[in-house]
Image (cartoon, grey):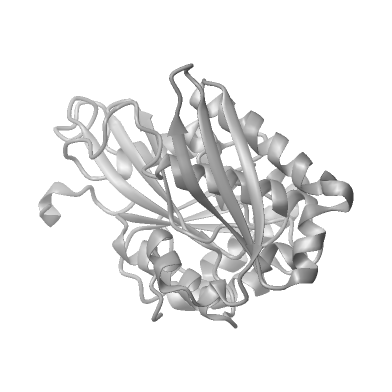
């Protein structure tokens, strides 16, 4: 698409514009921020459906997730990227590289900051430094305003915009939805003119087998403590549609040590049973059909060094 087809930076077309209300518009918006800034919650709220897993723990998102929303004549393709942090492991490096690649490939970069964090400006500083070199329209989103006094919000907005030029500042609560409608309308006018990129009823590009694995991983994150959730991964190994209208799903939870396997199973198998039941119920709701989910727990010491797994996640193994 040529530059002449794109709106002026940050300008929302007025009704009656040639590229305004009568023509279709579509574009990619990268949601980037520190871990636990609320990117996945915001994505789900913008889309109006759950397309990304959400937990209170940092670094829950591992792979790039697309969420697709319609606003008027505009199709908004939101890219929920892994949180940006100082990487230590191969998986960490691949996640951070994916986040920056998502920003570079987008039409607009939405910088999400947890306004309720005591050191929000300091936490955002490394991110702002890198974004100074990203030559794309930028929007600053201060999230969690339901937990932040307004004077603190205004002071934070001033401090951050002094560090990075942005086209607009929005204050939202991804959890309650406050301010999200205005944000969505802004993006609808800011994306380039052009045909829609996905079918109208499509909400995400994630394969259902991966969606199912992510749901199970979410339930594990919510129930397990400390570092164990980061030492496991989930794979959907079998998916069988049955004649009775149900689907039989088999998944393997890989952990790094035998002691971790015992924790995931729980006393008398209670932990794995609770995880399976929660994941099964949510998957059945998404599919609108009965689900039989069978979980296995296996030890694979170096699952984080498996190149094929990174390909499934759309991550660069060599990042």
In the current view of this chain or complex, which residue is farthest to the front? 243
Point out residue 139 in the picture as x, y percentages from the top left corner. 44, 55
**Quadrant in the picture for residue 64:** bottom left
On the image, the x and y values in percent for residue 46 come to: 49, 37
Which quadrant is the C terminus positioned in?
A: bottom left
In this view, the residue in front, 68 or 249, is 249
Q: Position of residue 80 (x, y in %)?
A: 47, 53
The vertical placement of 205 against 138, above or below, is: above
**Above or below, 239 relative to 266:** above
Q: Residue 70, can we see it?
A: yes
Query: As rendered, which of 124 and 277 lies closer to the eye?
Result: 277
Residue 266 is left or right of residue 112, and the answer is right
Please tell me which residue is depicted at 52% across the width and 80% down the height of the picture: 90
Is any part of residue 11 visible from this angle? Answer: no
**Residue visible at 63% across and 51% down?**
217
Along the horizontal axis of the image, is 75 left or right of 286? Answer: left
Which is nearer the eye, 271 or 299?
299
Residue drawn at (65%, 62%), measured in percent from left and top?
A: 298
Give the quarter of the image for residue 37: bottom right
Q: Position of residue 72 (x, y in %)?
A: 33, 25
């Amino acid at each position: 698409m040529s530059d002449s087809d794109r709106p002026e930076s940050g300008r929302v077309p007025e009704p009656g514009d040639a590229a305004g209300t009568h023509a279709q518009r579509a574009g990619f918006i990268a949601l980037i921020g520190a871990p636990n800034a609320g990117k996945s919650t915001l994505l789900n709220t913008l889309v109006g459906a759950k397309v990304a897993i959400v937990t209170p723990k940092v670094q829950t998102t591992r792979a790039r997730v697309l969420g697709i929303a319609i606003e008027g004549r505009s199709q908004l393709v939101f890219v929920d990227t892994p949180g940006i942090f100082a990487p230590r492991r191969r998986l960490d490096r691949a996640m951070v590289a994916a986040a920056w690649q998502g920003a570079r490939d987008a039409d607009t970069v939405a910088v999400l900051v947890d306004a309720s964090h005591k050191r929000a400006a300091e936490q955002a500083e490394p991110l702002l430094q890198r974004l100074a070199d990203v030559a794309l329209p930028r929007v600053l989103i201060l999230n969690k305003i339901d937990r932040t006094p307004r004077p603190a919000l205004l002071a934070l907005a001033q401090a951050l915009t002094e560090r990075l030029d942005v086209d607009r500042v929005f204050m939202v609560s991804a959890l309650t939805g406050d301010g999200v409608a205005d944000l969505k309308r802004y993006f609808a006018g800011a994306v380039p003119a052009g045909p829609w990129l996905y079918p109208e009823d499509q909400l995400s590009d994630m394969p259902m087998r991966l969606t199912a694995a992510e749901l199970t991983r979410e339930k594990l994150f919510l129930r397990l403590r400390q570092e164990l959730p980061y030492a496991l991964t989930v794979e959907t190994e079998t998916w069988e549609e049955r004649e009775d209208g149900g689907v039989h799903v088999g998944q393997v939870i890989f952990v790094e040590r035998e002691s971790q396997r015992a924790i995931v199973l729980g006393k008398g198998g209670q932990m794995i049973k609770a995880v399976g039941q929660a994941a099964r119920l949510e998957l059945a709701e998404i599919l609108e059909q009965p689900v039989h989910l069978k979980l296995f727990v296996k030890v694979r010491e170096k699952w984080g060094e498996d190149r094929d797994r990174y390909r499934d996640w759309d991550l660069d193994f060599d990042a």
